[in-house]
Image (spheres, helix red, strand yellow):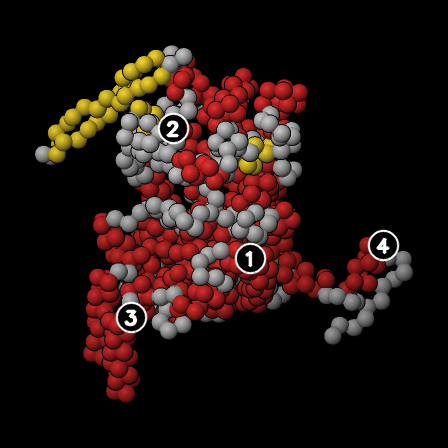
Amino acid sequence: MKTIGFTQKCILGLMLALGLAAGAQANIGGPAWDKAPSRTNDMAALQNGAKLFVNYCLNCHSAAFMRFNRLQDIGLTEEQIKSNLLVTNSKIGDTMRSAIDPQQAKAWFGVNPPDLTVIARSRAGAGGTGADYLYTYMRSFYKDEARPTGWNNLVFPNVAMPHVLWQLQGERRPVFEELKAHDEVVHVFKGWEQLSPGSMTTQQYDQAAGDLVNYLQWMAEPIQNTRVRVGVWVLLFLGVLTLFAWRLNAAYWKDVK
Amino acid sequence: MAEFHEISPNAPAGEKLLNWIDNRFPLSKLFKEHMSEYYAPKNFNIWYVFGVLSLLVLVIQIVTGIFLAMHYKPDAALAFGSVEYIMRDVPWGWLIRYMHSTGASAFFAVVYLHMYRGLLYGSYRKPRELTWIFGCAIFLALMAEAFMGYLLPWGQMSYWGAQVIVNLFSAIPFIGPDLALLIRGDFVVGDATLNRFFSFHVIAVPLVLLGLVVAHIIALHEVGSNNPDGIEIKATKGANGIPLDGIPFHPYYSVHDMFAVCVFLMVFTAIIFFAPEMGGYFLEYNNFIPANPFQTPLHIAPVWYFTPFYTLLRAVTSEMMYALIACVVVGAVLAVARGKMPSLFKGLIVGGALVVVAMMLSIDAKFWGVVSMGGGVVILFFLPWLDNCAVKSIRYRPSWHKYLYAIFVINFLVLGYLGTQPPSAIGGRVSQAGTLFYFGFFILMPWWSRLGTPKPVPDRVTFSAH
């Protein structure tokens, strides 16, 4: 039938237009983001990430909507949280506040360190997920004496934050290649050169940064894995219901001539 | 007034109860009029499920909204945190919130499809003009509802989106700045704005919306539904006075709609559980950063359902004004040269055109952008009187009408896509061409819809048994 053909054409056109729209989203500026490992179901990795987070991040950053006792979701007991992760005079039901005084932070860094509760959700973009961004960011610090902190970052130029994990990673320098294109000299990022070693090898550091980012990813939405699990059951239920509704509809309509 | 109806004392308890109610409230009568004896054409296709789906999403939004309002704090200092509190600490709060945020997008998706169905089959034509107008008013109310609701999470996009849109009102000559101040309740978007938007979002607009939905359905059931053939089924009635091509809404379309609801819910829940952000289109990434009045985001984009109209706004630059002025001049010249009307009318057209051109030259393009955005919605109200085609349904219109409608859809999608993107030189030109096409489609409709030879319309609907 001709009308059906037209409807199909419309749907095809729609899909095509949407496909083009999705394809046209390109990454603008900066180096490409590396793919962060996805381990939000890996309790050991999450616990290691939580440890790094509390030890290194929570001094300046807060996670004002994340409660310490929620860490039970990643396999820690209340006792473990209390003895290892609770910062001074916090209670187990408290949210994660930073140790730093906001006014001092502003004086020292020029900006207030942002809250990290949902940072992994907010940093997503055309270049990848928020975790990809953070994973790349945590591995892109380099020594830059021109900056007040002595550190700079390739994906966040002139960032106010110093390289907090530098003892683990050591000092590095980005290597650029000069290319001539259309009579203009462009610097293309080629890779990193290790200047001084840290306490970890590159592989170990990437692993640690991956765990930390993985934790941030989990903390941004602690329910995320439950959500998917529940969703499977809901869809299975609806699948069966749809089957019944379909047959019920057919049973009524078979008499309509 | 119905007479009091006595029932045998030996009747079953259920019957007695129903009789007791029917003597006091027209329950059976309403059920018959709107369900079991409401005769709908039997040739409905898939396009006809989006009305009931809109109703379903409306109910979802109201119910989830009630529960969200129990935990949400309409306070600039607490709003962002209270949403995260709902997501983390309220039992099943995350589900309620995702249902509501996905519901907003789903609402527009089904409403757009529902409206396009009307366009395809001429559902707005006589005698369904008021059904269509109530529907357009629902769309307008829905836009207001969505816009004000989007401020409530108090993220960066909430804040700056509201800032940009409310600032547009200040472009209106004379009253603009005061109007914008009245809407915001402050000189910038702030706590006062959040409080009044919350009030409008949870009570004022939903009340209007519900009233309009009732009016929409009453008007529809008064005239009866149109169908894909655009034929009045009431024109061919059987000996019993029932349309030959009509079937009772209940049970035939109620089971039909149950099936549609199930399929819709599969898509809806798949998004809620597996992709609630929908790649940044349903929940924008920037909105996970708390509102900061001192930091403007690099790129402010409205949520996807507003983007076609946002592009209509952005397309009107001071350059574009010359194209629009040329359109007004050409339109007036053509009307005077070709129109058959008394010279008094011609004089009025020339005078009117001169006034409009003078205004277009003297008032800032930003204002005309607002007119363009608003006009993009308002022009839909006039559709019943713009369409002059001899037949209602796209099935019997000249073939090239189909291609025109296909281009209209593609154009609307392109406008929508461009609205999500940062401004660019090429994008700007495309959106200007798209804007001219969008308005040209409607404004020239009285002319082009008359052209071509429609195909013969059958007396009875086309239907093959399932």
Q: Nearer the viewer, mark 1 or mark 3?
A: 1
Quickly name the residue at label 1.
B195
Amino acid type of the residue that numbered disc 1 sits on in the rendered structure:
Asn
For marks 3 and 4, give the CA distance: 74 Å
Return the disc, 3 or 4, that comes first in the chain's sequence. 4
Quickly name the residue at label 4.
B12
Chain assignment, label 2: A
Q: Nearer the viewer, mark 1 or mark 4?
A: 1
**Quarter location, residue B324:** bottom left
Chain assignment, label 1: B
In the image, are marks 1 and 3 on the same chain? yes
**Element at badge 2?**
loop
Q: Quadrant of the N terminus of chain B?
A: bottom right
For marks 1 and 4, give the CA distance: 54 Å
Residue in the image at 32% along x and 34% along y: A158
Residue in the image at 40% along x and 64% along y: B169
Amino acid type of the residue that numbered disc 3 sits on in the rendered structure:
Ile
Q: Residues within 10 Å of mark 4 (few under 14, many from 20)?
A: few
> Who is closer to the viewer here, B256 or B379?
B379
In the image, are marks 4 and 2 on the same chain? no
Residue A210 coordinates in the image, percent (x, y)? 44, 21
Residue A246 coordinates in the image, percent (x, y)? 57, 40
In the image, are marks 3 and 4 on the same chain? yes
Residue in the image at 50% along x and 33% along y: A100
Q: Residues within 10 Å of mark 2 (few under 14, many from 20)?
A: some
Amino acid type of the residue that numbered disc 4 sits on in the rendered structure:
Pro
Quickly name the residue at label 2.
A162
Q: Nearer the viewer, mark 1 or mark 2?
A: 2
